[in-house]
Image (spheres, rainbow, N blue to C red):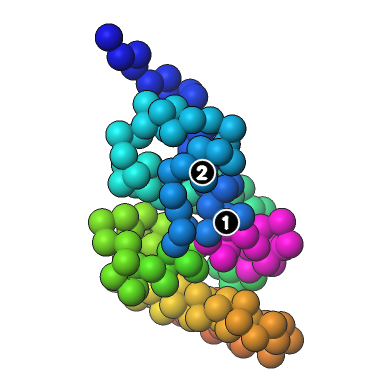
Amino acid sequence: MARTPDPQRRSELLDQIVDYLAEHGLSTLSMRPLAEHLGKSTRVLTHHFSDKEELLSATMRRLDERHRAWLRSLPGWEGGDSVGTIVRRTWDWQLREENLPVARLIHEIEGLVAGGRLVGHVPELLSDRSAFVAGLLRERGVPEKDARRISTLVNSAYTGLQLDYLTTGERERVEGALDQLTTMLDAWVAEHARG
């Protein structure tokens, strides 16, 4: 009789897999090299994940959970700072050398999804990002309909600016544009919160 997978061990494996993907990328993921990197057999992976599809889905959910926890742990999230300040702090945190691999992995996922190569594996990290940031805006008094629209615009601009920087390396120019975005964002929040 097969043993039931241990949820704690599965969670530890998922964290290791997220770290592996941040280092090696997702587009060339294969079970055998992943298992070798983890010092496991492929049988250990298939014990916890029935196939590569289940492993991918579980890994995307874990990446999403970790990313949201990291964002919520940033200072000021709980109402003390302006949304623009939090966006800028998030930018600075994501572009630290030790966090760049995860930022690059997220953009790789976005590219694979946009190219139709990751159908069925879109984590909430991508599909519900606007809802996540809209929650922050609502906490600052922005009405729901405005929060979703502003969040969509800010998320799209933020992602584009981050891709621009990662592609060109032109930090001063891109961060000047980011500062303009955060200034506009804080003005929008103030305007919409007044009602």
| Callout 1 amino acid | His
Q: Is residue 24 left or right of residue 63?
A: right
Q: Is residue 46 left or right of residue 80?
A: left
First of labels 1, 2 by sequence position: 1
Q: Where does residue 147 sit, x and y in percent of width and height? A: 37, 69
- The boundaries of the magenta stretch are 89-105
Q: Please say whether residue 139 is visible from this viewpoint.
A: no
Q: Which quarter of the figure has residue 49?
A: top left
Q: In the orientation shown, which residue stands out farthest toward the bottom? A: 173
Q: Pointers 1 and 2 in contact (CB under 8 A)?
A: no
- Quadrant (top left, top right, bottom left, bottom right) of the C terminus: bottom left
Q: Which residue is mark 1?
A: 24
Given residues 162 and 53, the one toward you in this image is 53
101 lies above or below 176: above
Q: Which residue is mark 2?
A: 34
Q: Where does residue 74 sit, x and y in percent of width and height? A: 64, 53
- Helix, strand, or loop for circle 1? helix
- Quadrant (top left, top right, bottom left, bottom right) of the N terminus: top left
Given residues 20 and 93, the one toward you in this image is 20
